[in-house]
Amino acid sequence: MSGNLEKARKLLTEKTTFALINGETVCVSEKSGIAPVMELLAKTPEILNGASAADKVTGRAAALLMVYGGVKELYSALISEAAVSALEENGVPYFAEREVARINNRGAEGLCPMEKAVTGISDPGEAYGVLRELTKKLSERRG
C-alpha cells in the first residue's frame, strides 16, 4: 500500500465514508454510496485522475466510477466481488479488509439499486452515464 493510500485509509472514520489524496489535494466526504465520487466527477473530475482513494463500502458502481475518473489505487473496508472484477479488469490495484458477494440496498432486502443499474456494464464511461441519469431521477423524485 502506497503512502498516500495509507493516509487516505486513515482518514476514514465513523463519519467519513470516502477519502481521496492526489498530490497536495485531500478530499473527504461523509456522504454515503456513490455520492462522493459522483460529486467529484461533476465538479472537479481532474482531482480523481491519479489519486489514491479510500472508501468504506465499494460496489461495482463505485469501482467503475473510480476507474472512469482515473483513480490509480483503492482501499476499501468492504468490497463486493463485482467491484473486484471491475478493478481487476481495468488494472486498478486495490486493498480490501473484507470481500462480500454483493452490496445490498439500505433495507437489506435486495441488491443496491446502483449495483443493479451497472450489472452487465463493463465500460466505465457507460456506467457513469447510466448512474448519472439514475441519480438525477432519484433526486427529482425526492423533490
Image (cartoon, helix red, strand yellow):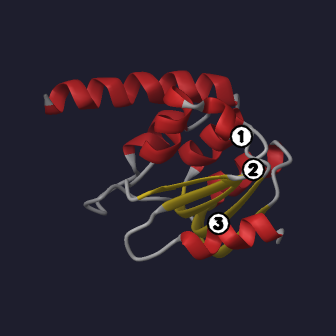
Report the front residue among 38 and 133: 38
Viewer-nearest of labels 1 and 2?
1
Relative to 13, residue 122 above or below = above
**Crowd tier of the residue under label 3, counting other residues whose Cα lies within 10 Å: few below 14, some 14–19, many 20 or above:** many
Residue 4 falls in which quadrant of the image?
bottom right
Nearer the N terminus, badge 2 or badge 3? 3
Report the front residue among 73 and 85: 73
State the CA–CA distance, disc 3 to disc 1.
17 Å
Disc 3 is placed on an element classified as helix
Relative to 143, residue 119 above or below = below
Residue 89 falls in which quadrant of the image?
top right
Type of amino acid at the residue the image marks with label 3: Ala
Q: Is residue 95 left or right of residue 57?
A: right
Give the residue at x 40% y 76%: 14
Residue pointed to by mark 3: 8
Type of amino acid at the residue the image marks with label 1: Val
Q: Is residue 57 visible?
A: yes
Disc 2 is placed on an element classified as helix
Viewer-nearest of labels 2 and 3?
3
Residue pointed to by mark 1: 67
Q: Is residue 121 visible?
A: no
Residue pointed to by mark 2: 87
Measured as percent of width and height from the top left, residue 45 is found at: 62, 31
State the CA–CA distance, disc 1 to disc 2.
7 Å
Relative to 67, residue 83 above or below = below
Is there a contact, CB below 8 Å, between mark 2 and mark 3?
no
- Which residue extends farthest front? 24
